[in-house]
Amino acid sequence: MTVNTFEEVTTSSPYKPLTVKLKKHAGRNNTWRITIRHQWSGHAKKYRLVDFFGVDKKWIEAKVETIEYDPYRSAFIALICYKDGERRYTIAHKDMNVWDKIIADEKTPLVSWNRMLVSNIPTGLQVYNLELIVGQWASSIRAAGAYGTIFSQEGEYTQVKLPSGEIRLVHKKCFATLGQVSNPDHNQVVIWKAWRSRWMWKRPTVRGKSMNPVDHPHGGWEGRSPIGMKAPKTPWWMPALGYKTRSRKKTTSKWILKTRKGKLMI
């Protein structure tokens, strides 16, 4: 069993005005039926309202007050305070410390955890909290230890290599944060015991061929018998394991230059 040391974390209690309680949809309902497969009600926790946009206060300097643990995500979060007194949560950089300064604008100094347009970021630098749609919010590269790389600047778009290996075109008016996401050792954690997964809202997963035929397409017969069909199926008789689920007509496919498996899309 391994656990995180939480050396970067500076406080154990969140900033209450930026926390909300989310309604649970897993566990058992009033008739004692499990409502969602492989999910449990889990440990009590509150959701932290994280600011994934971060550019509506251009050139207003903010300082880091605390580095905190977030039970809803693998990365650590930082509580920042702007000069006007407003406080917000943001995804923490792996080297971020208390009292560090953060600036967000179209063009900022090339310092880690500053946020700026991808058009102003030189090639080869690492980024996270990447915006894929202009004016939306950071929807990519937010997991613990993740980072993308600015591949090239060509015309109206910037080529960004995502953590999966996919190379995608991003409009130059999109924003990104310099550096790498905090908690890079998250993938080294070993769960070890079942109840620790229960704290994380996870229920046990049973093999389909261990079930009865009424419960799963792979079910029936004795012991570890074969599934009895050419290709594996989900409990709802849909193809599984190797079946491509991404639609060829998806509109965002035109922004992908190279898939994560190395296939060229142009």
Image (tube, helix red, strand yellow):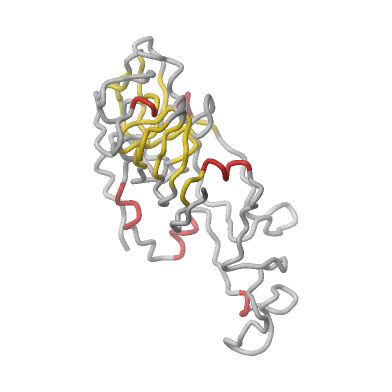
The reply, left or right, for residue 224 in relation to residue 94 is: right
Quick one: which residue is furthest to the top in this view?
Answer: 84
Q: Position of residue 190 (x, y in %)?
A: 35, 61
Residue at the (34%, 41%) spot, across then down: 149
Is 33 placed above or below 120 here?
below
Is 82 placed above or below 72 here?
above
Q: Nearer the viewer, residue 210 or 165?
A: 165
Q: Position of residue 75 (x, y in %)?
A: 38, 42
In the rendered image, which quarter is residue 175 located in? top left
- The number of numbered badges drawn on the structure is 0
Is 98 placed above or below 254 here?
above
Residue at the (38%, 27%) spot, across then down: 119
In the rendered image, which quarter is residue 218 located in? bottom right
Q: Position of residue 142 (x, y in %)?
A: 42, 40
The reply, left or right, for residue 189 in relation to residue 231 is: left
Q: Nearer the viewer, residue 3 or 107?
A: 107
Residue at the (53%, 31%) spot, across then down: 133
The reply, left or right, for residue 242 in relation to residue 100 is: right
In the rendered image, which quarter is residue 179 located in? top left
Residue at the (25%, 27%) spot, across then down: 111
The reply, left or right, for residue 225 in relation to residue 107 is: right
Q: Position of residue 66 (x, y in %)?
A: 31, 29
Image quadrant where one finds the N terminus:
bottom left
Quick one: which residue is furthest to the bottom in this view?
Answer: 222
